[in-house]
Amino acid sequence: MTDAGFVIASWVITGLVLGGYALRIALRTAVARGEKTLFKPAAPKAENGVDR
Amino acid sequence: MSEKINNRDDRSALLPRAVGRVVDSLTLVSIGALTFFGLWASPADVVQGDAQRIMYLHVPAAWAAYVAFGITTLASLLWLWPRTRSAVWDRVAGASAEIGLIFTGLTLLLGSLWGRPVWGVWWAWDARLVSTAVLFFLYLGYLAIRAVPAEPIVRARRSAITAVIVFIDVPIVHFSVNWWRTLHQKATVFNPELNPEIHGVMALTLWIGVVAFTLLYVSLLNRRYQLAYLEEGLEETALDSAILQRSGGVK
């Protein structure tokens, strides 16, 4: 890899690490505020066990 | 035990909303300026060529890690001192340590990327590199201690004491290049003579990097603090609900 390749790689890795971390905080904040959910809640079932 | 953390001066955010937005905007502008100066406006180094441009990320990342761990220590001391004890300082300490860990990991990665073209190796058992790796694992351990379930007051106390102890490695990392013979170059700006060995556009670019990463640290700290506050509230709600269920109540 050339010197320029190492430089570009360093900028890309920095963007991925810091951007990824900022995104992780944003997603966890949205989940904590109840704005987003990571898992869809199971559909409610009727008394006789048949899905509504 | 009736000892409680003072939550009367509790706050859900570190910075007022408007200030947070200004910091976020300045962070984006300064990162844009750093990219422009670091990749285009700044000249290539006479000896190292273009590979030296990695310095504009590597040094600011290391600086941001020092700042983050310094704030963790300060917040921990403020928590340990009874007159200033507050849940706010415990949250600041934890949030800042996590961000510092990210910056330390990034410093190691960028150093490795810089070392390969300049030294010919990805890693060397050098005093600066090893002490920085030790720093990474010390704060990883600190975060692991924070994650151990306990009463909030117990967790905060053990975390604060740990934070003060592990900070000892920060000056060791910084002065390692002076105390031992190392492959790593000596400090360019904050050297013992306080005589910067970098000038002109290169110095300007490095300072833009330091400002950009400091602003980014403040922005991340503000957001990570808010998240810690929200998650504490969720934990308390879940605990209240579990106690109510166990005691036969319905919720």
Image (tube, grey):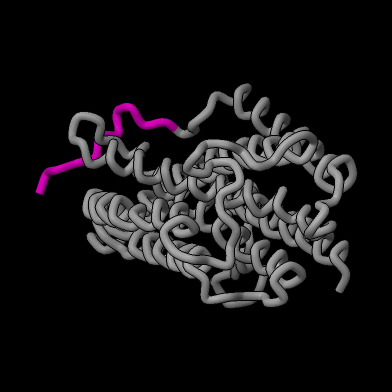
In front of the other: B163 or B1: B163
Left or right position of B246 against B177:
left
Above-or-below relation of B154 to A41: above
Residue drawn at the location 36% of the way across and 31% of the way down: B10
In front of the other: B46 or B159: B46
Above-or-below relation of A34 to B81: below
Stretch of the chain drawn in magenta: B1-11
Is B5 magenta? The answer is yes
Residue drawn at the location 70% of the way across and 52% of the way down: B55
Above-or-below relation of B182 to B193: below
- Estimate the x, y position of residue B179 in percent, counting from the top left: 41, 59
- Estimate the x, y position of residue B169 in percent, counting from the top left: 38, 58
Left or right position of B133 against B219:
left
Which is the main secondary structure of the residues drawn in magenta? Answer: loop
Residue drawn at the location 75% of the way across and 39% of the way down: B205
Instruction: Using the rendered view, name the quadrant where residue B119 is placed.
Output: bottom right
Residue drawn at the location 73% of the way across and 30% of the way down: B25
Above-or-below relation of B135 to B16: below
In front of the other: B58 or B250: B58
Q: Residue furthest left?
A: B1
Instruction: Using the rendered view, name the quadrant where residue A1 is placed.
Output: bottom right
Left or right position of B33 against B163:
right
Q: Is residue A30 visible?
A: no
- Estimate the x, y position of residue B218 in percent, counting from the top left: 56, 37
Instruction: Using the rendered view, name the quadrant where residue B111 is placed.
Output: bottom right
- Estimate the x, y position of residue A33 in percent, counting from the top left: 56, 45
